[in-house]
Image (cartoon, rainbow, N blue to C red):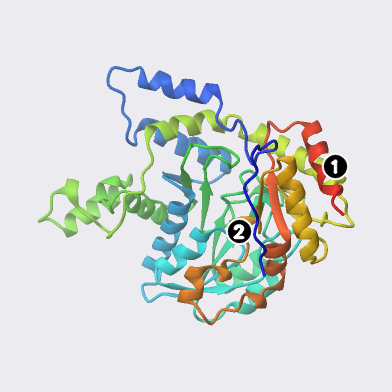
Amino acid sequence: KYPPVGNRMKKIKFALMRNNILREDLDAVIEHLKQEDPILTSGSHVKAFESEWSKWLGVKYSVFVNSGASANFLAMAVLRTRFPDGGEVIVPPLTWISDIASVLQNGFTPVFVDIEPRSLAMEAKQVLDKINGKTRAVFLTHVQGFDGLTDELLSDLRVQNILLIEDVCESHGATHNGKKLGTYGWMSNFSFYYAHHMSTIEGGMVCTNDLEVYQQVRMMRSHGMVREADEEAVKVSFQQDNPDLNPEFIFAYPAFNLRNTEIGGIMGLSQLRRLDANVERRTDNLHRFLSQIDPHKYRTDFKVKGSSNYAFNLVMKEPDADFVGRLMKRMTESGIEFRRGSSGGGNQIRQPYLKRLLPQCDPEQFPEVEHVHFYGFYIGNFPDLKDEEIDEICAILNSVE
């Protein structure tokens, strides 16, 4: 059973995030607002941010949306246009709800795979074992900044012609074989929520090298309107096929309004300039943290090569309900803000929405996720975190007996 967390701490000393939006970001927004009649809806700054993000990541196309969850949803919506009869999408139980929800909302069946404990991502062999004639895609989450890919997985997916979609919402700047995560998949998704590596307050990005996907995402982001495509041939084709419609109001898909704003674009351009330095600092922080926490009590053997740490993962080495209670009590008393269960609060299969929709799923079939669910936490890591603060956090964690 999951014991109660207890009352929230009265004073947070070590927060999950601090100072992720700086004065220079706000000043850039203020300068824009000082104009006589500033454009606030999606405009030139959004386009500039999409372009600069694509260059930074190393992809051809990027589409800025209002959240990482919207990015996930659009990826699945595009997949559904390829497979209108649905099918299966392989997903991890350890992820944010929007990954699984987007699969369900677009008429696919989620097929769950347990995680590999060093990366917290789906274990490659289990993924490959679950592939069958109904499999439409593998929707892989790079959890908490770790590289979730293996060469075996990439090679076999390519041979079997199975699409890979990467959720990189928590892992900006992480790499596999020296190449950024988010460049391996058919599509990839990012989040710019306040607590992530960079922030546009709320925001997300869909990235791809596929021109057709790019045009679809652009249209689907904005009500399915054909005029949102930036490929002239796409517009001409729809206009010729629909001569009875106003060219400004041709709707190719029964879509959504998931646009972001010029303010988000301005903040993205400002924050992107610091992203590489932030990733480097977060990585240094992670190494300091892992070198000091007690390896007899906590796991320290994580896949750190290529990582871009989002948060300090604190996973107990052995299951011990009494120790968990003492640990949470000590962290609460010491002002350490934490989240139990790691990414998404632990095993999604235990959540009410999946119990209702997929009652046949047994959470205990995924022992590695179950261990993280009951005996795992994450603690804030960010560029503003000082060495002495990391040292104090580690000393508090190690003091629990």
- Name the residue type under label 1: Ala
Q: Are marks 1 and 2 in contact (CB under 8 Å)?
A: no
Q: Position of residue 224 (x, y in %)?
A: 28, 54
Q: Earlier in the sequence, mark 1 or mark 2?
A: 2
CA separation, marks 1 and 2?
25 Å
Q: Position of residue 293 (x, y in %)?
A: 85, 48
Residue 66 location, quadrant: top left
Q: Residue at x 32, y 51 (%)?
A: 219
Q: Which mark is residue 345?
A: 2
- Residue beneath label 1, please? 395
Quadrant in which the N terminus is drawn: bottom right
Query: Hey, which residue is sitting farthest left in the picture?
Result: 244
- Name the residue type under label 2: Gly
Nearer to the camera, 337 or 7: 7
Q: Residues within 10 Å of mark 1 (few under 14, many from 20)?
A: some
Nearer to the camera, 121 or 1: 1
Q: Residue at x 51, y 74 (%)?
A: 355
Q: Position of residue 153 (x, y in %)?
A: 66, 67
Reply above or below: 62 against 20.
below
In this rendering, does residue 215 appear at all?
yes
Q: Residues within 10 Å of mark 2 (few under 14, many from 20)?
A: many
Left or right: 348 in relation to 397: left
Q: Which mark is residue 324?
A: none
Q: Position of residue 149 (x, y in %)?
A: 67, 60
Callout 1 secondary element: helix
Residue 377 location, quadrant: bottom right
Callout 2 secondary element: helix
* Numbered-mark total: 2
Quadrant in which the C terminus is drawn: bottom right
Reply above or below: 47 against 321.
above
